Amino acid sequence: MYIPKHFSVEDRGTLYDFIDHYGFGILFSMHNGRPVASHLPFELKRDEGCIYGHFARANEQWQEIAEQEALIVFQGPHAYISSSWYETNQSVPTWNYVSVHAYGRIELIDDQHEVMGSLNRLVEKYEQPNSSYKLDETNREFTERLSRGIVAFRMKIDRLEGKWKLSQNQSEDRKRSIIAHLEQSPSEDARTIAEWMKESH
């Protein structure tokens, strides 16, 4: 990812927090000599430095992915920034956004106990705290049968890149104007970018 210095975020804890929050990402790899991608929910295990996920077994992407260097993209909020919000028309519009790229090699998981553990953690992560749904003895036979239709994997993170493009290269007056306009937007993403801008300055 192209990251000018003033947009770069390198603190691993901050990048891990982002992955935890925006855990639905895109996994890119090569298959049959062509780039392929899958949109998947992921689980980060910080103590291992690994990202866990799974494919539907019918998704052919898994068939050649073992030991490839893969890329997972985690995308946060983003918003159009109009040049009309600046004090001069000697400017161009742009886009503000936050994103993390994680690189590493994919290892397929064959052990059924480990597969079920990964699925259980994923359910616990995304279910609401007061949800009654769990993977337990009441549905174990059913879920174990269905789990044979997936291919679980882990990716050991070799490299992380973080880009917070939040108008850090603009003047304070321009930043205030951008934030004010974003806060008035009907777009939730735009209003969230305004909050990110305020927190980053």
Image (spheres, rainbow, N blue to C red):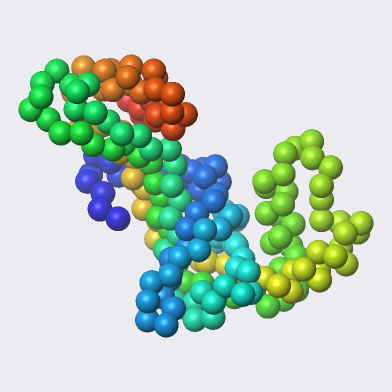
Side of 37 relative to 140 (left or right) = left
Side of 11 relative to 125 (left or right) = left
Q: Is residue 134 above or below residue 80?
A: below
Identify the image quadrant of the N terminus.
bottom left
Percent from the top left, x then y, of residue 3? Answer: 26, 49
Q: Nearer the viewer, residue 184 or 129?
A: 184
Residue found 49% across the figure and 77% down from its top = 65
Residue found 47% across the figure and 58% down from its top = 26
Quarter assignment of residue 54: bottom right
Side of 45 relative to 177 (left or right) = right
Percent from the top left, x then y, of residue 59? Answer: 57, 72
Side of 134 relative to 107 (left or right) = right
Residue found 40% across the figure and 29% down from its top = 190
Residue situated furthest front in the rendering = 186
Residue situated furthest left in the rendering = 90
Quarter assignment of residue 11: top left
Q: How many marks?
A: 0
Identify the image quadrant of the C terminus.
top left
Residue found 22% across the figure and 21% down from its top = 85
Quarter assignment of residue 139: bottom right
Does the rendering let one see residue 180?
A: yes
